[in-house]
């Protein structure tokens, strides 16, 4: 039994083979087609396909105007890429507390962390469950702070009948190998503002307007780069894989939600476990199924003895030396760090696998 799986569509070989035989491997028409299909199938707005979710975070911060010595408020409950993207701008990550019942950023803590230096906030949708975006956005607007969603876990999630990727100033997706949708490695940045969207497309390729810079008689594109750009674009064969996998995304999300419903029903009365409290006004993508557990190490050992993997996936990042003096006491984060655990939730789990997981947990540890 695996904790994570990489889903590859049965149609992927044909699509990727076509790209390889064409020899047009870099960014081209397939990348644009992939972006269009993301809008069509998922209801997200103006996605710019990139080579990673980390690139999406960094580019979003640049477009948000984050400069050296600015502050960006983030949760500690995330992968280290969230904090590193802030440091890439030579800005300071400021860590807010989370909600113990969701693992997501606390709006109240976010508000308390705001200073005159705060330029942006990055709420992270832990495990794929959307943050309290309405409350976070309301606070951000009062202080002229840009909202950059880290939706690395949340592709396919919904918040109050809106797709994640259609709500905030910026939304950053990851299409890394074990995500619900993969392009091998890749990501996307959604920009609500048209100007930011157009600029993102230029900045992802060295600051060159690729569509409007035609080759001269001498054979090189005619361009004048005026702002710093990056090599962040997605390539055609990654886009081909993404297009193939997009055809299966609805059944992938549906299966994960079916498994989550079984877990909620079967595990809600188990002593020593506290399930997270998910509201009915939003739908998780269930990249993870996380809960709080007593005697975590014994729990992990018990599951391992029965062939079941489990993982914390990510512990708090603010203790890393690279963040220097950013560590502070965060009450809910402290508890979450000690108690959180995730169990397998993916479309390749069989009914027998799920039965074994539930039965093992119910038997105690």
Image (tube, helix red, strand yellow):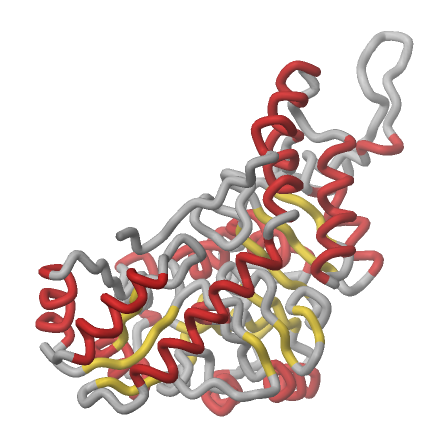
| 337, 90: nearer the viewer | 337
* As drawn, 287 above or below 167: above
| 96, 13: nearer the viewer | 13
Quadrant that contains the C terminus: bottom left
Asked where in the image residue 357 lies, by quadrant, the reply is bottom left
* As drawn, 45 above or below 258: above
| 292, 321: nearer the viewer | 292
Taking the spot 66% from the left edge, 72% from the top edge, the residue there is: 146
Taking the spot 48% from the left edge, 71% from the top edge, the residue there is: 258
Residue 207 image position (x, y, % from top left)? 73, 38
Residue 339 image position (x, y, % from top left)? 22, 79
Q: Can residue 324 be seen by looking at this rendering?
A: no
* Furthest-front residue in this view: 352
* As drawn, 179 above or below 26: below
| 244, 148: nearer the viewer | 244
Residue 280 image position (x, y, % from top left)? 57, 88
Taking the spot 27% from the left edge, 66% from the top edge, the residue there is: 312
* Furthest-top residue in this view: 218
Please give left or right for residue 266 compared with residue 99 in the image. left
Residue 353 image position (x, y, % from top left)? 29, 61
């Amino acid at each position: 039994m695996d904790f994570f799986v990489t889903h590859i569509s049965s149609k992927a070989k044909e699509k990727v083979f076509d790209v390889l035989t064409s020899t047009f491997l870099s960014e081209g028409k397939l990348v644009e087609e992939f972006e269009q299909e993301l809008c069509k199938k998922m209801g997200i707005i103006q996605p710019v396909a990139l080579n990673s979710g980390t690139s999406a975070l960094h580019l979003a911060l640049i477009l948000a105007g984050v400069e050296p010595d600015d502050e960006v408020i983030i949760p500690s409950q995330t992968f280290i890429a969230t904090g590193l993207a802030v440091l890439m701008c030579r800005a300071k990550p400021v860590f807010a507390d989370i909600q113990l019942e969701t693992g997501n950023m606390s709006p109240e803590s976010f508000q308390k962390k705001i200073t005159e230096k705060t330029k942006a906030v990055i709420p992270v949708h832990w495990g794929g469950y959307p943050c309290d975006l309405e409350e976070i956005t309301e606070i951000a607007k009062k202080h002229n702070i840009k909202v950059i969603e880290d939706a690395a876990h949340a592709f396919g999630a919904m918040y109050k009948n809106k797709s994640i990727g259609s709500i905030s100033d910026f939304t950053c997706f990851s299409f890394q190998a074990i995500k619900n949708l993969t392009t091998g490695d890749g990501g996307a940045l959604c920009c609500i503002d048209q100007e930011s969207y157009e600029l993102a497309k230029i900045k992802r390729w060295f600051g060159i307007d690729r569509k409007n810079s035609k080759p001269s008689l001498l054979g090189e594109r005619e361009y004048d780069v005026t702002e710093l750009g990056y090599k962040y674009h997605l390539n055609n064969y990654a886009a081909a894989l993404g297009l193939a996998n997009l055809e299966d995304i609805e059944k992938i999300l549906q299966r994960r939600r079916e498994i989550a419903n079984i877990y909620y029903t079967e595990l809600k009365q188990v002593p020593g476990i506290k399930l997270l409290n998910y509201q009915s006004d939003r739908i998780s993508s269930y990249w993870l199924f996380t809960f709080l557990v007593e005697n975590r190490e014994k729990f992990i050992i018990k599951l391992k003895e029965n062939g079941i993997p489990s993982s914390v996936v990510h512990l708090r990042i603010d203790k890393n030396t690279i963040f220097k003096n950013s560590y502070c006491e965060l009450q809910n984060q402290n508890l979450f760090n000690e108690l959180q655990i995730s169990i397998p939730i993916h479309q390749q789990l069989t009914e027998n696998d799920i039965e074994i997981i539930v039965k093992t947990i119910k038997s105690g540890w």
